[in-house]
Image: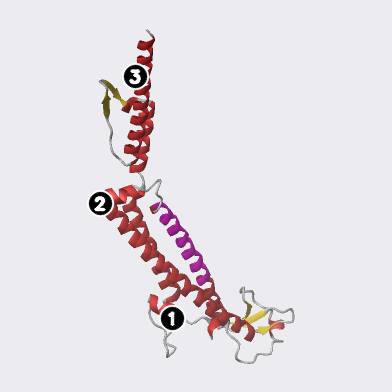
Amino acid sequence: MDNFLNSFNEHAESLREERKQDDFDNLQHSLSGVQTGQQTRHGLSKDTSGSVFGDKRKSITEQIRETLEWLLLNNQAYAEAHEAAMTSLRSAETTVTNALESLLANLEREQAIFNGMLERASTLPDGQKVFRDAEGLVKTLDGEIIDNDLAGTIQWRGDEPSYEEITQQKTHVDDLKEGINEVRGIEAELGGIRGELTNNEKPPTLERADELKERIGELQEQTKSRLNSDLGGSIKNENNEKVGFSLSAAKAIPSMSSN
């Protein structure tokens, strides 16, 4: 009887070791993406797909196949769509970087011109800057009309900017500030898109990658349109003549700090 029990216990222990090895082997297969299915040892059939441990192995396998790295290596259509989106993204990011450099440089330039005009403007006793418009009315920068008696005390030199000139210059400065804020918003959105496209654990679907590529193109065109609006009429050549917009021309605008 003892011999029988000893033999039975040894056999049971052997089976337990076999099962442990099966579990370890199947986990390794799952991690490498290999389906294990049903395995049989010593005439005992077991289906691991329905066991608790089998569910965990399936979950691990599915997680691996849902990562960006796996999709790029094993799904050619996805890899091509993703690369197309990333190529567009890199191009748009470059456009935005160049646009911000150009807008900031032009803002510095236009702000300096505006400040110089303010310095040349006539000043009331209370310190307010005033300007004469085309009809001869004297106004503050905000458009408030100065009383004729007070306006009559102003000594005009002749080189003061007119009301129309100063307000036009102020509009240039305000438009550039607005443009910079808009392009910075585009930069932030592109940053979010980059984060989505490079998320290894939760990559976008193929359809979503195509949508992102389309949105990237829209943002790049929006950036160019904003540059054309803000800089197209203010870029000048070496003869001080206004020229049409181009990104290369915009980048060539000198910074006032470099003069």
Instruction: Name the element at disc 3.
Output: helix
The residue identified by callout 1 is 252
Circles 1 and 2 in contact, beta carbons < 8 Å: no
Which callout, 3 or 1, points to the residue nearer the camera? 3
**Where's the C terminus, which quadrant?**
bottom right
| Foreground label between 2 and 3 | 3
Residue in view at x 50 percent, y 72 percent: 176
- Residue 241 % position (x, y): 42, 87
| Precedes in sequence: disc 1 or disc 2 | 2
| Mark 3 neighbour class, 10 Å CA radius: few under 14, some 14 to 19, many 20 or more | few
Q: Foreground: 189 or 64?
A: 64
Does 155 appear above or below 54?
Answer: below
Which image quadrant is residue 227 in? bottom left
* Quadrant of the drawing holding the N terminus: top left
- Residue behind mark 3: 11
Query: What is the residue that sits farthest to the right in this orientation?
Result: 125
Label number found at residue 76 = 2
Spatial CA distance of label 3 from label 1 is 84 Å
Q: Which residue, as the protein is rendered here, is positioned at the far front?
A: 3
> How far is the residue under mark 2 from the one under mark 3?
50 Å
Give the residues drawn in magenta, as a range: 176-196
**Relative image position of residue 171 (x, y in whole percent):** 53, 74
Is there a contact, CB below 8 Å, between mark 3 and mark 1? no
157 over 213 or under it: above or below: below
